[in-house]
Image (cartoon, helix red, strand yellow):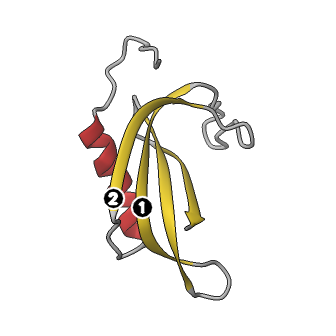
Amino acid sequence: SVQSSGNAMIDRDAALLVASKHLEAMTSSAPSSVNAILASFTDNESAVINESGRTLQNAPAWVVTFTNVTLTTQGNGGTVLADSTMVIDAYSGELLEVISYGV
């Protein structure tokens, strides 16, 4: 379970708002569904966020997944149907990571 550090966490609606704003910058398509869960997030591949030096080891975060969005592919400018998952810091509301993958 996610442990509280005594600071107030943002709620699900606030996390959805942050993630939705980032999604709008990536696509004009609407997702077929949206899911948000509060989790302890660890990224073993990029465990440190460059700007802040903060580690992503058991970080309390909202993990918001948008299903079936149309994203522009890098390189050829084509599009792909994808799911896009955004990891939002549960305390600051900062976007920590975006993971998109074709479906």
Number of marks: 2
Would residue 38 appear left or right of 45 to someone viewing this image?
left
Query: Can residue 42 be seen from the camera position used here?
Result: yes
Q: Residue at x 49, y 53 (%)?
A: 85
User: Mark 2 and mark 1 in contact (Cβ < 8 Å)?
Assistant: yes
**Which quadrant of the view contains residue 50?**
top right
Callout 2 amino acid:
Ser
Residue 93 placement (x, y as % from top left): 38, 38
Dot 2 corresponds to which residue? 33
Using the image, determine if residue 31 lies above or below residue 98.
below
Quadrant of the image occupied by residue 75:
bottom right
For label 2, count other residues whose C-alpha is less than 10 Å away and answer few (under 14), some (14-19) or many (20+): few
Quarter of the image containing the C terminus? Answer: bottom right
Q: Is residue 23 above or below residue 74?
A: above
Query: Which residue is most to the top?
Result: 6
According to the picture, the residue beneath numbered tag 1 turns out to be: 67
Question: Image height check: is 84 above or below 51?
Answer: below
Front-most of 22 and 54? 22
Looking at the picture, how far across and down is residue 48, in whole percent?
Answer: 69, 37
Residue 25, horizontal then vertical, whole percent? 40, 68
Q: Is residue 26 visible?
A: no
The residue type indicated by label 1 comes to Thr
**Which residue is the extreme one toward the front?**
103
* Quadrant position of residue 47: top right
Element carrying mark 2: strand
Residue ID at (35%, 76%): 28
54 with respect to 35 (left or right)? right
Label 1 to label 2, Cα distance in Å?
5 Å
Task: Estimate the x, y position of residue 55 in percent, counting from the top left.
Answer: 65, 30
What crowding class fits label 1: few (fewer than 14 Cα within 10 Å), some (14-19), or many (20 or more)? some
Taking the image as shown, residue 80 lies to the left or right of residue 3, namely right
Closest to the observer: 68 or 40? 68
